[in-house]
Image: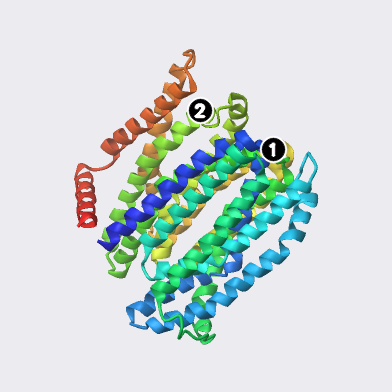
Amino acid sequence: MAIGSNLAANTAFSLWSAASTLLAVPILVRYLGIESYALVGVYLSMQGLLSILDFGLAPATNRQIARNLANGCQRTNANLLATMAPLYWGVAAIIAILAIPAATLLANHWLKISNETTNVERSLAIIGFVIAARWPATLYQSALMGAQRIVMISGLGIAMITISTGGGLLTVAVINPSIELFFLWQLICALAFTQVMRLNAWIVIGNKSSAAKDFQLIRNIWPFSAGMAGVSLTAILIQQLDKVLLSKWLTISDFANYMVAGALSAGLYIILTPVFNSIYPRFSTHIANHAITELRREYRLATRLLCCALFPVAMSGVFFAKEILSLWLGERALASQIAPVFVMLVIGTTMNGIMHLPYALQLAAGRSRLPFVINIFLISIYLPLVYALTSRYGLLGGSAASMIQGILYLFVGSHITHKLLMHGMSCKWLIKDVLPAAALSASCLFFLKLALTDVTLSALASTLIAVASAVGLIAVCLFCFIPAQSLTLIVHRILRARDSAES
């Protein structure tokens, strides 16, 4: 029951978050303008980049609280939370203090702003305060996750997204189309969210009145935290480096176009995240039980299933990019500018997404140094590549660098992973498990798009064709590439999980 409800809660949160983003972006672009939307991109990038300051303490806290609960050490959890809280609130205070000088620096010496910078400075300062206000919530969320309160976290997260996004959209659409007002609302929501998370974390952990600070507890979790910090640091850089660098090298409007395209291409994570969360524990179980034959079989099956779902959706986005963007944004001219950027980001995200399964294999095998080494390699390639391409080709060059990075990650990362953890699998995995769904989806949609070349269709009609094509291709790929026995077993497992969740 817990597994089924946790999976359902996680999926609901992912879907709600993605739906909120898809709703918010075109409304913000319409009322605030594309350049003001760039500041939303800066906010998201800064929030992700500053998570480096966590140093792996949040996942270490999550792990330790879960272990303490299993060992019956409830009071130790209260002491751990009491000890960690001042550290997180201290970091929040430092971020808030530095917000104003950092805003001045970014507005005047980093971003390429075409207009007067005063409003931008104020918005950036508020962004700093929002990040500071949300910072301690990371600790309390980790505590709740360690206590297996996934449903509670997801419910609070959905409520937070609804209030912050819905209220923010109402402020710009009804009260005043001001980016500063939008971020002020986010600040109010962030303060409230942190306090709600703090209250619920202490209710769940308990023993607040008798909790005592014990810095030995931090020393106990530091080895795990330090190990996670290296992987987290490089992973965050991989995710945020493009946005940080392009915000410096591109004009503010081009950077906004990049962020809009990135917001839509990130919708693929609706497929990727639940797959990773479901398959990672199974890989861990097989490795713990030394069931290598079963691991190899399930690894290849999971790859084919992911490719059968991912490539039809991604290729529909690639071949119908302009039409989908026109419907989403409501502006054909803007859609035409963003379409080639979106195509490259979708391809890069897809290649990165396929690597979720080798990454799950790395973690399940306890080889946390392996993703660290791969990430360092990718960063060393990406830095000169993005500089050279952006300097020469601007926005399109920066987008191409992100796409090339994703392709390199798939081929290099999978080869290294298979060589070390699943010998003899590399070429077989790419050719027999990844390529078929990719080739079928790309070829079918190419010929469909070619057949529609001389047909005049509205953006809505074209998008409906893209959606129908994706759904049909998923069914065809499953029929062609997944053994009937495996499909039957998967359906039975889904039904059992649903029944257990309902009971």
Q: Which residue is mark 2?
A: 327
User: Cβ–Cβ below 8 Å for labels 1 and 2?
Assistant: no
Quadrant containing the C terminus in the rendered view: bottom left
Which amino acid is tagged 1? Ser
Residue 155 % position (x, y): 40, 56
Viewer-side residue, 405 vs 328: 328
Image spot of residue 203 (x, y percent): 41, 73
Amino acid at dot 2: Leu
Query: Tell me, what colour scheme is on the image?
Result: rainbow
Q: Gap in Å between the C-alphas at discs 1 and 2?
A: 20 Å
Give whichever of discs 1 and 2 has the lower sequence position: 1
Q: Is residue 140 above or below residue 71?
A: above
The front one of 61 and 161 is 161
User: Pointer 1: residues within 10 angstroms few (<14), some, or many (20+)?
Assistant: some
Q: Is residue 217 above or below residue 330?
A: below
x 65%, y 49%: residue: 42
